[in-house]
């Protein structure tokens, strides 16, 4: 007996980036109609978990730290702040914050906060930027 999943996979094909189907609907995966059906909260949560894991890997790529010593490198909520920023920007744009990255590597959390605050990004992201900068500043008190 043929599996319904295998049959649909064969007919739909897997597309990991959104595309327009023959009916002009934004579609992803194995034919998921995003325009009419969207996604469930559970799928959104799974996507968030996957995206946060990717951002964490990118943070490791940038800072090259030993994951077992995370609290030594990132006091307070500074790790959360940097992952949030990475999630928002992506690794390529995050790497453009050279002075902030250097300040983090030197443990100068006040300077890292200043560099994040003194950016176009900060003026674009509203409350997110304020929260991240506050978390970086708070790390100065925890290190």
Image: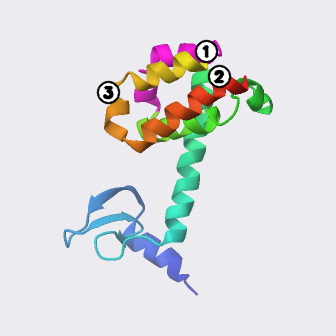
Label pair 2/1, CB-CB below 8 angstroms: yes
Element under label 2? helix
- Above or below for 52 versus 23: above
119 or 68, which lies in front? Answer: 119
**Disc 2 target residue:** 140
**Disc 3 target residue:** 120
**Residue at mark 2 to residue at mark 3: CA–CA distance:** 23 Å
Asked if residue 129 is among those painted magenta in the image, a careful observer would answer no
* Sequence-wise first label, 2 or 1: 1
Residue density around tag 3, few if under 14, some if 14–19, many if 20 or more, within 10 Å: few
The residue stretch that appears in magenta? 91-108
* Sequence-wise first label, 1 or 3: 1
**Disc 1 target residue:** 108
Q: Position of residue 45 (x, y in %)?
A: 55, 62
Q: Is residue 76 left or right of residue 25?
A: right
The secondary structure that most of the magenta stretch takes on is helix
**Residue at mark 2 to residue at mark 1: CA–CA distance:** 7 Å
């Amino acid at each position: 007996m043929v599996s319904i999943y295998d049959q649909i996979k064969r007919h739909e094909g897997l597309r990991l980036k959104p595309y327009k189907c023959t009916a002009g609907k934004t579609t992803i995966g194995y034919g998921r109609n995003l325009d009419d059906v969207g996604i469930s909260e559970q799928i959104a949560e799974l996507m968030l978990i996957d995206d946060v894991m990717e951002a964490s890997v990118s943070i490791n790529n940038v800072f090259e730290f030993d994951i077992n010593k995370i609290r030594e490198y990132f006091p307070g909520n500074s790790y959360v702040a940097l992952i949030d920023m990475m999630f928002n920007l992506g690794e390529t744009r995050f790497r453009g914050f050279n002075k902030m990255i250097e300040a983090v590597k030197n443990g100068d959390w006040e300077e890292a906060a200043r560099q994040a605050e003194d950016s176009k990004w900060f003026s674009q992201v509203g409350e997110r930027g304020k929260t991240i900068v506050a978390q970086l500043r708070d790390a100065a008190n925890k290190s």
